[in-house]
Image (cartoon, coloured by chain):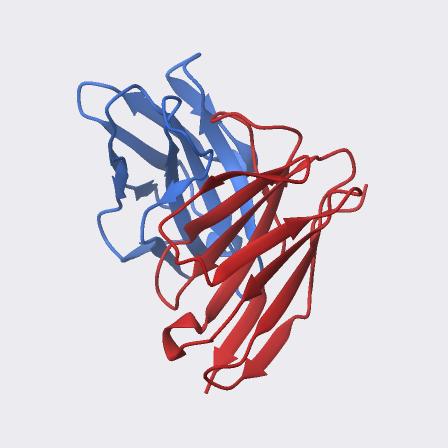
Amino acid sequence: AQSVTQLGSHVSVSEGALVLLRCNYSSSVPPYLFWYVQYPNQGLQLLLKYTSAATLVKGINGFEAEFKKSETSFHLTKPSAHMSDAAEYFCAVSDPGGGADGLTFGKGTHLIIQP
Amino acid sequence: ETGVTQSPTHLIKTRGQQVTLRCSSQSGHNTVSWYQQALGQGPQFIFQYYREEENGRGNFPPRFSGLQFPNYSSELNVNALELDDSALYLCASSPGVGAGITQYFGPGTRLTVL
């Protein structure tokens, strides 16, 4: 069975600093990987996804993530944090070999931006 | 382009009751997936409907059931509500099935079971 681990339930960075949110996955086959963002009282919005093309994936709002098969990781980064980035971030995996096309999510990381 | 919408926004029920949640998919999307998000947790996959048929199911009991209509809107029904069913229920639509297809989420329905 596939699973996702997000290290750090809360991450705090200063405005303008580097954002790094960690995601490690467990899957029997190379998976598809997604990062979603959830603002308070809203649904999830896709930031970016990896579907076995380029290992460095660029998303919206200046975010990017790098797929590293050897480390089974898909960490999310942004060079310079903005106050508007404060939100909950979820990493998710989808197994191409699985029977159902549901996403398996991590528990989320709450990103706090300090002024 | 209208996104995914869900109704109602909030709902309060008592233990043992039944509830129906509704979802309208994004224009052009024929697939709907439902997720349960407990407080402080990531969403958990309940099931998926594709062209009015259940296409896959997560680890949820049969009292969680669903429907998809010819216009691709969907309902989630939960019978015999339990306290642990209190959660945010998210609907997501997509333009087809497949592990790599992006799912577009609605704002959710907050269900409280007393």
Q: Which residue is drawn at 37% across and 73% down?
A: B84
| Residue A82 seen in this snapshot | no
Q: x and y percent of residue B79 in the render?
A: 51, 70
**Where, quadrant-wise, is the C terminus of chain A in this rendering?**
bottom left
- In this view, the residue farthest toward the top is A53
**Colour chain B appears in:** red
Does residue A76 appear left or right of residue B91 in this picture? left
> Quadrant location of residue B62?
bottom left
**Colour chain A appears in:** blue
- Judging depth in this view, the residue of B40 and A17 nearest the camera is B40
- Judging depth in this view, the residue of B105 and A83 nearest the camera is B105
Q: x and y percent of residue A84 in the render?
A: 53, 54
- In this view, the residue farthest toward the front is B62
| Residue B46 seen in this snapshot | yes
Q: x and y percent of residue B26 in the render?
A: 73, 42
**Where, quadrant-wise, is the N terminus of chain A in this rendering?**
top left
- Judging depth in this view, the residue of A99 and A57 nearest the camera is A99
Can you say whether A20 is above or below A10 in the image? above
Q: Which residue is drawn at 27% across and 57% down?
A: A9
Does residue B62 appear left or right of residue B30 in this picture? left
Does residue B17 appear left or right of residue A96 in this picture? right
Q: Which residue is drawn at 78% across and 42% down?
A: B70
- In this view, the residue farthest toward the left is A70
